[in-house]
Image (cartoon, helix red, strand yellow):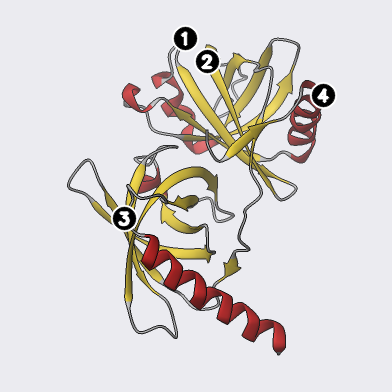
Amino acid sequence: MPFSHELNDRQSARVIEQAIRACAPMRVDPHHTSGTEALTVQLIDANDDRLTFLFAPNQAAMSEKFLPGQYCQVQFSLNGGVYSIGVHVIAIEIPSTSLNERVAPCHLVTSRPNVIQILERRKFVRTRLTKHTPVTIRWLQEDRLAEASLFNMGGGGLAFRIAKDFADRIHIGDRMETTFELPGLPRRFTLQVSICNKTIASDDASVIVGAQFQEGPEAGQAGVLDELRRFLATQRQTTLSR
């Protein structure tokens, strides 16, 4: 991915160990051609060649849609970093249960990747917005719109919070169009972005989607980005001077 870099073997192993200890919520997103929706999981065990995830109880019934050999991407946040791993499904395991258990825990067993990718540090500082700022998301390849709210904004990109059902239709690397207005600036921005990460929000009902602005002559939005960056720089200077 153009917005991430690979950790070495030792760093990758450490991140996996920390994710297990922290019980970090993760999002397993099957390849978009499979038609299977992304689900919430938790990494509970790892050995030299396998990872074992636990499906969230309310999503265990959806586990049967995952098939052996299916490629998936898993993303999660840990200690301020956003990580991504590519795995393929080995098996779906439903352990035997006693009569007292209402719902059997369901495990997703996958391959263990050699390396983990981490999102690159941003060239521009992003600012958390103090007011609710709506943003309209448009799919470029199909006639679909969705309403979201801006989570943070910087000169290099933005993040928005969106409902899970819409987030399931957004995939890493997708190019989309965002339309929004910023408090204090009397104009509307329409900018194309490339999706680079997705993270489950703390409310477990929405997803934080990170995106980078498209740059270069082919994007045709250099002037608009310059204007946006000047405004953001001014806002940041004003905040620092208080």
Q: Are marks 2 and 1 in contact (CB under 8 Å)?
A: yes
Looking at the picture, does residue 48 appear above or below residue 210? above
On screen, residue 149 above or below 56: below
Q: Residues within 10 Å of mark 1 (few under 14, many from 20)?
A: few
Instruction: Specify the label residue 69 is tagged with.
Output: 1
Mark 3 is on which residue type? Gly
Q: CA distance from mark 4 to mark 1?
A: 26 Å
Callouts 3 and 4 close, C-beta under 8 Å? no
**Residue highlighted by disc 3:** 220
Residue 6: give x, y in percent of width and height. 67, 29
Residue highlighted by disc 2: 88
Rendered location of residue 218, percent (x, y)? 32, 47
Residue 197 locus on image (x, y percent): 52, 43
Which is more N-terminal, label 4 or label 3? 4
The span from disc 3 to disc 4 (Cα, nearest Å) is 42 Å
Question: Contact, CB < 8 Å: mark 4 with mark 1?
Answer: no
Closer to the camera: disc 1 or disc 3? 3
